[in-house]
Amino acid sequence: MKKIIDKLLALFLYSFSATIFIPPSLKPLLVIGLGVVSFIIFISSKKRVINKKLFILSSLVFVLYGLSLTTSTNISDGLKMLETKLSMVFFPLIFLIFLSAKKIREVISLEKFSKLFYYINTAYSVILLVYFTQYENPKYPSLYIPGFYQSASQDIPLIGEHHTYIGLILSISILLFYCLKLKGDVFKPAFSSLCLAPIGLLIWLLQPRAIILGLFIALLMLFLTSIKKNITVITTVIVITGAIIVLLTPAKNNRFLEIKNLFDYSQFNSASQRLIILECTIEEIKQNPFIGLGIGTTNSAIGSCFNKKANEPEQKAFNTHNQYLDLWLTCGPHALILFIFFLFAIRKHILDSLDRRFIPILFLFAFTMFFENILERQTGIIVFYFIIFLIAGQSTKTSPPRTLLIGPLPNPVTGLSIANKLVLDTVTIYGKRPLSINTSPRNFSEKLGRFNLISIAHFALNYLEIYKVFFAQRVFYTPGQTLFGVLKYAPFVLVSKFLGKEIIVHIHGGYIRKQHDQLRGLTKKVFGKVLSYSNKGVVLSKTLQDNLSPFIPKENIYVLPNFYNNQLTEQIIEKSFSSLKICYLSNLMNEKGIFFLLDALEELNAKGVPFKATIAGHIDQSQEKKLLNKMAQIEGLSYKGLVRGEEKRQMLQDANVFVLPTFYKMEGLPISIIEAMATGNVIISTDHGAISDLVTEGDNGFLIKKKSVDAILEKLLLLAKEPKVAKKISANNIAKAKKNFSDKKFSKGLLNIIHA
């Protein structure tokens, strides 16, 4: 099936080389077919590199045309013209988004396309030259009557076209073909060199002056930038050949001679007509300098002005014959500025991604737009956008992918929000500026991750930022571990999956598999499906790898331990172990064991054991009064609230024992324990989550029984009696943290996972 789709894509892409032969009524079908096939490729692809900048710029120009309908006095004509301009969005969409996952060169060879395009145009030129000898029209009885060739080219059955667009397509075929020829092959006698004769002759007979002049300059640019061989000889030959052709051309068929009478309105030729049109355009712009007349209105306004100046009895409509002024007059100066910026963005992309050989093609288009509205008709707009984005789509400049982080950020301060902050800082330093969607609740609560209407209402506001997924190549999200904690991230995951983004899920805990096993039926399937859409999974410890194994292949599950900030250890303070200096640094939740610790401290008071205890962290609002009252009754205890920076460092440095008797069901690898180890504290905690990966009994501290006041008290009394034991453990912890858990090591590990 994949091969069939690729062949269809190649067929449609190569079919565009025959644009000049395709009747106008069939050209939209070709565009639609290419769009459908490329969309199928987009949907079925996994990895995509989307160039949004050019797509957005081109689409904005179309949007401004659409908005100009509000000022138009001819809505029906405006809608028809807007339909013609749909390619301004459709071709960039195809080449820069739909085909972003499949480099076009994998399916189509630009060299092969350019040859096909060149030879098809050669055949067209021969057909048209033969047709000129058979063409009959009472208005143009002779080959030497001005307008004969222009009329004949439009009247040829099925493939008739305006002479301007024929000249443009033929010129592009020459440039594209010779842009891709090897330096040594350009002037070798060959069939391709002979093909220049009918193409060049037809261009000259049709006399699209701006295109001929633009082609002449573009060829010189091509030789200067790419060939760089015998440039003086080449330039001389081109100039002399051009002069001979001009001199040998009969005066009646030489539209360049009209320029001599440019300001002589009595001669009234196409050149002097252009000057009147220019004057009318400028007058209309002066009357409407900022808003624009609106799409569908411009031509009639110019025609009305022209008819007055030229004393024409027959009412005619004219376009501005200048694409840039048309943008200004139709939509306003902002549209002109945006379009010029778009052209320069294309130029920069070509220079960055390919090479300067293709710049002459862009130049020809840009130059021609000074004298023709090439985006006025279906053929012109299709040719411009197809050729430009075919070239631009051949290669996308490699740039660091942008990461979108979706998860809690401070405040409130939790281990998860601190880790996410470092993730953002890391990808900021080592990649493109990241995006983020902060899913932190307004207030800390022990009920985080549980279903409730307030949580839904608050989290729903985050969905307003889902558009950020479009602007990132990688989505890094940190969901909760409950059913609601995962499902509330589902819209972000589904949109990311549909758009082919790389998805990385980072689980901060050891409960997610238990939650999955407890679910039944549809909720279990949906829960697992959302997690399985991730390309990579990240856990805090080897012990926790099995948490993601039901959803993600084991080879795509990576271990990334939590960390401590190096600022904590910049100023090392010699610790004293002559008395207990106890520290608790975490959220004051029941499941974190805070009440059991407070009961143990009351027992120390009762036994007359001197100590100093410092507690810091968020308090659940429902427990605030109870906890503050209980802490106030304990001698030697102080509550610091939420601490950061220097205050946090000082608190950990002053302590010598860190106690976290947690039985929190979603516990993983607490940052607070790592920070306490880095600052030389003895750890007293439970064998819960992945804490046993941090703490080895007797080496780094003690793993105690959960929900046990006696177990906490026992270890505190041991450390009070054996300060030498505490001092040894302190040294072990500093060495272990420095080796394994620095923030630099976390950042390095994160980058390794991202680039794996």
Image: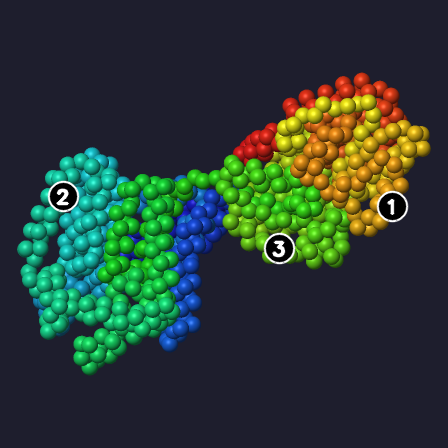
From the viewer's perspective, tell me whether residue 709 is left or right of residue 513. right
Looking at the rendered structure, the kind of residue marked 3 is Tyr
Mark 1 is surrounded, within 10 Å at the Cα level, by few (under 14), some (14 to 19) or many (20 or more) other residues, namely: few
Residue placed at 19% from the left, 68% from the top?
Answer: 275
Residue placed at 72% from the left, 25% from the top?
Answer: 680
Q: Kindly indicate the quadrant of the structure image that contains residue 298.
A: bottom left
Q: Which residue is mark 2?
A: 235
Tell me, yes or no, whether the two marked residues, 1 and 3, touch with CB atoms within 8 Å. Answer: no
Mark 2 is surrounded, within 10 Å at the Cα level, by few (under 14), some (14 to 19) or many (20 or more) other residues, namely: some
Q: Could you tell me which secondary element the residue under label 1 belongs to?
A: helix
Looking at the rendered structure, the kind of residue marked 1 is Asn
Depth check, mark 2 against mark 1: the one in front is 1
Residue placed at 94% from the left, 30% from the top?
Answer: 607
Q: Which residue is mark 3?
A: 463
Quadrant showing the C terminus: top right
Residue 462 disc label: none
Q: Which residue is mark 1?
A: 629
From the viewer's perspective, tell me whether residue 456 is left or right of residue 241. right
Depth check, mark 1 against mark 3: the one in front is 1
Q: Kindly indicate the quadrant of the structure image that contains residue 647.
A: top right
Instruction: List x then y, in percent, for residue 497.
Output: 57, 47
